Amino acid sequence: MVLVKICGITSLQEAAAAVDAGADFIGFVFAESKRQVTVEQVDYIQRHLPSDVKKVGVFVDTPIHLVNQIAQEANLDFVQLHGQESIKTCLKSDRPVIKALSLQSDQAMNQVLDYLAVVDYILLDGPKPGSGVRFDWGLINKITQVRSKLMLAGGLTPDNVASAIQYTKPIGVDVSSGVETNGVKDLYKIKQFIHNAKGVR
């Protein structure tokens, strides 16, 4: 069954809805964003979540020593590096790493393969993360040997997530704006997204 990450969580209510619906990962954005959270917020939320639900902190080109500090203070299970972080930087993380990459060309696929050797998951996203814009999913089908570490993001919604999974066969899917209404997490959409993703066999 595919793994599901709900990203951009800012409240316990949102996190609880995602967990109740079967989310495997909860994402908290520490980078500058309309969904940005503080260490204190995340520490409070994570205390109310089951231990088997993985807490992920999202960072964009944050110095790795600060990433490690925040990960410890907020009790994160994973860090998601969503900027131009090098392989060397990824190796300095104290937590398992999800490295986000934009897959827009065949050239980018070589980069994916390089990072796959050192990180736990690769998150393939659209050109503007969090915008709901998808990339050419056909490019993923050229990466056949490492599906067990590939997560799909960018433009996913409750309506298209099942077909996206069937087409690309990733280990997991990630959504933020696709489960929002007017820029706010929609608890019904979260439930539908997870239901539709988990329903793919």
Image (spheres, grey):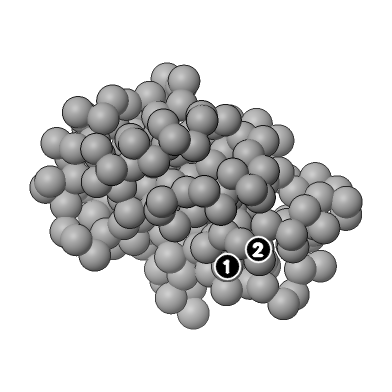
The residue at which mark 1 appears reads as 149
Assign a secondary structure to mark 1: helix
User: In screen coordinates, is 25 left or right of 96?
Assistant: left
Residue 102, x across and y down, in percent: 71, 44
In the image, residue 41 sits, relative to residue 154, either above or below, namely above
Q: Do we see residue 92 in this rendering?
A: yes
Residue 64, x across and y down, in percent: 49, 37
Assign a secondary structure to mark 2: helix
Label 2 environment density (alpha carbons within 10 Å; few <14, some 14–19, many ≥20): some
**Which image quarter: residue 163?**
bottom right
Of the two numbered discs 2 and 1 on the same chain, state the one appearing first in sequence: 2
71 vs 53, nearest the viewer: 71
31 vs 127, nearest the viewer: 31
Q: Residue at x 46, y 20 (%)?
A: 32
**Which image quarter: residue 197?**
bottom left
Q: Residue at x 67, y 73 (%)?
A: 146
Residue type, label 2: Leu
The residue at which mark 2 appears reads as 116
Residue type, label 1: Lys
**Most distant residue in the left direction:** 48
- Of badges 2 and 1, nearer the viewer stands 2
140 vs 63, nearest the viewer: 63
